[in-house]
Image (cartoon, rainbow, N blue to C red):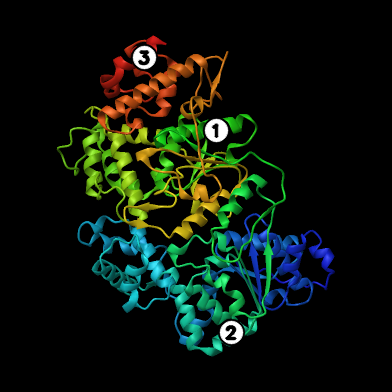
Amino acid sequence: MTASPEISTAPSSADAVLGKLNPEQRRAAEATTGPVCIIAGAGTGKTTTVTNRLAWQVRSGAFPASQLLALTFTKKAAGELQQRLAGLGVSGVDARTFHSAALRMLHEFLPRFENRAVPEIAPNKSRILLNIVRGLRMPYKFNPLRDFGTMIEWVANQQIAPNDAIDALVAAKADQELPPEIIGQVLSEYSAAKARQGVIDFEDVLRWCIRLLEKHPAAAAELHARYAAFTVDEYQDVNPLQQRLLELWLGDRREICVVGDPYQSIYSFTGATPDYLLNFGTTFPGATLVKLASNYRSSPQVLERSNTLATHFHGTPNALVAKRGDGPEIVATQVGDDNETEAEWVTARCRELHAAGMPFSEMAILYRTRDQSTSFEQALGARNIPVSVDRGLLKRDAFKELGHDFERAQRAGAGDLYGEGLATGDANVADFVDRIARQVGYNPDAAGQGGQAEIVRQADLKTIVEVASTWTDAERTVEDFLTSLHHQFGDDNNPDGVRLMTLHSAKGLEFDAVFLPSLINGVLPYWKGKNKSPIDEERRLFYVGMTRARTNLHITWTAIKKQTPSLFLEEAGIATPKRASGAAAGKSAGGVKAGGGRVKADDPVLDEADQALFDSLRAWRTEAAAEIGKPAYVVLSNKTLFSLVEAKPSSKAKLLAVNGIGDAKYEAYGDEILGIVARH
C-alpha cells in the first residue's frame, strides 16, 4: 500500500479529532510521542484507536504525515488504515505490511549501494519444494508441501543459522516427526534450488533488507531521516526476523507505538511470539502503557466466560468489560456420539436462528483443523443452507493431488471409465479412487500421524475413498463420481452463507452467532498420540473463538471414541456440559412442528410425520454403516435422506429417480428403503 499525497493540516483541537473516543482510547491517541504500548483486548476498538492516534499525530503537529510509517500484517489492514485516515481528513501516512516496506526499500537501495537489482520473488514455496519432496525416501515423499513450507518459514523467522537449524527444529517442533537427515536434506536442497533459479522467497525479502541496512549505514541513515515515528499493529504476532528489521528501522530512537493483545497470540508455528509485546516496558523504560478493556462486541455472558478462561493466561491481566446488553447464557452441549450428529445439531440451530431473523452470513462455525469442515459442509448442504467455506474439501491438498488422474479419466471418450494411458485392472470407480489415493500416499493406518497438515490430508483422502467405496457398479464413471462429490462438497463460496473456517482464520472477525464444535481433549487442546501443541497457545485459540461472538455462542462436543470434554470448558467456568436429548440431539430439522405440509429441502422444519420418517431412515443408515464399518454418509448422504422424505418413493423407478440413489445403491439398500417408507 503506497502512501497518498500528503495533505497539509493546521493544528486542530483534540476534541474535534478525538471527541468520539472513550477515555482509555483517548489517552492512547493523545500519547503522540515517545514509546507507547497499547494492550487492545478483543472488541475494544483497536483500529479506531490506532487511526485516531495517527491522525492526531499529524493534526497536533507532532509529525508530518510523510514521516509516519504504520506496519500491519495484511494488505487489507493497511488499506483499512488508509481509508479510515482519509475519513479523518488525513493522508500521506505510509501504511504497509512488513514485507511491502522491506521490498520497497530493497528496490530503492540495492541498485544504489550494491549495483544489482532485487531478484524475482517466488510466488510460493510449493513450486520449489515439489521436486525436492517427491525425491525424498518413503514415506516422507508423500508429506504435504505445506508442512515443509512451514518448517522453512519457522527457521527463517527465528533467525536460526543453517548449521543450527536441524537441532533447533528437533528441539522446538514437537509435532515434526521428521528425522534430522530429512530436515537437513530439504533445507539444503531448498536453498540450492532458490540459488539455481535466481529467486528469493518472502522471508528472504526481510533478511536481505536486514543485511543491506547492517552492511550500509548510509542506507539506514536515509531511512532514519525519512521516517520519524513508527506504529506496529498486531505486535503480539511479530517474529524475531521482523523484530530485528524493526530495530534497524528505528535505530536508537524511541518514537514507536505498538498495539496488540497477548491473549490473541496464536501463530507460534510461524515463529511469532508475544514476548516482545509483554517485555516492551523493559525494552523501553518509561514507556506509556494503555489498556483498552471496554468491549463493544460481545455480550456480558460471552465475556464472563472469556474472562474466566483468561485468568489461566500468563502476563498482565486485562479483563474485558461489556458495553452491550445481555445475551443468552453460554453452555456446552454434548451432542450424540459422532461428528455427523453434531453437524446436524449445529445445522438445526442455524435454521432456528435464521427463522428468527438472523442472516446466515452472521453465523460462523469455527474449528481447530480444516478436516473438521467436512461433516458441516455435508449437513448444511443437505438442508440447502448456503455456506462460505475457508478452503473446503475440494480446495485442499488431498483432492488437488488426485486431480490429474481424475482429469485423465474424465477425458476418456464415450463415457469409458478409463482412458489411454491409465492403468488397467480397476473394476470400478471404488477401486480406481482407492488406487490413485494410495499412489499419493494414502495410508488407512496413518490416522493421527505426522504434522497437522498431513493429518488433515490423510483424513481428506480417507473421506474421498470412503465416499467412493460404494461406487462398485462397473457402468458408473469417474465423471459421475466427481459430480456426486461436488454435489456434497461444492458450492462453498456463497457470501450470504454460514462461514466455515479455522480458529486461526477467524482472528479479527466477529459474528452474531458462533459455533465452536468438537470441544474435546485431543481436538482443542490439539494432540495426536505423543504430539501435543503448546497448551497456552491452544487455550488462546479457544479464547479467540469465544470472543468472535457478539451474542450467541454455542459450544458442542461429542462422546466420539469415548473422548472427554475439553479441559478448557472447566477453566472457562463451564464445568458440567449439558447433554442434548430427544429432539435436540437427534433431529437435524430443528424440532417438530405439528400441522405442517410436506417437507421440502428448504422448509424451516419437518412436520411430525416427515420427521418420524427421517428419524427411521437415519437410524437404519447408522446400522447399515456399522455393518460395513464406514461412516454414515458413505451409505447415504443427509441430502439424499431429505430427498427420500420429500419424494416418499413407492417403487423401484421412483426410488431411482431420487438424487443420490443409483443402481448400486438400489442393489444394496433398495428393498430396505422402500420398506421403511412404506411403513410410514
**Residue contact at pointers 3 and 2, CB within 8 angstroms:** no
The residue under label 3 is which amino acid type?
Ile
At x 50% / y 88%, what residue is drawn?
216
| Badge 2 density bin: few <14, some 14–19, many ≥20, Cα 10 Å | some
Q: What is the distance, in whole Å, between disc 2 and disc 1 at their CAs?
A: 55 Å
| Badge 1 density bin: few <14, some 14–19, many ≥20, Cα 10 Å | many
Q: Residue 607 location, x and y as percent?
A: 53, 17
> Would you place residue 40 above or below residue 595 in this image?
below
Q: Nearer the viewer, residue 334 or 385?
A: 334
> Would you place residue 362 above or below residue 357 in this image?
below
Q: Residue 215 location, x and y as percent?
A: 47, 88
Using the image, tell me which numbered label, if any, was put on residue 349.
1
**Mark 3 or 1, nearer chain start:** 1
The residue carrying mark 2 is 251
Q: Residue furthest front?
A: 575
Name the quadrant containing residue 138. bottom left
The residue under label 1 is which amino acid type?
Arg
Q: Nearer the viewer, residue 604 or 128?
A: 604
Using the image, tell me which numbered label, if any, was put on residue 676.
3
**Mark 3 or 2, nearer chain start:** 2
**In front: label 2 or label 1:** 1
The residue under label 2 is which amino acid type?
Gly
Q: Residue 515 location, x and y as percent?
A: 53, 42
At x 78% / y 73%, what residue is drawn?
8
Query: Which quadrant is the C terminus positioned in?
Result: top left
SS state under label 1: helix
Residue 107 in view, yes or no = no
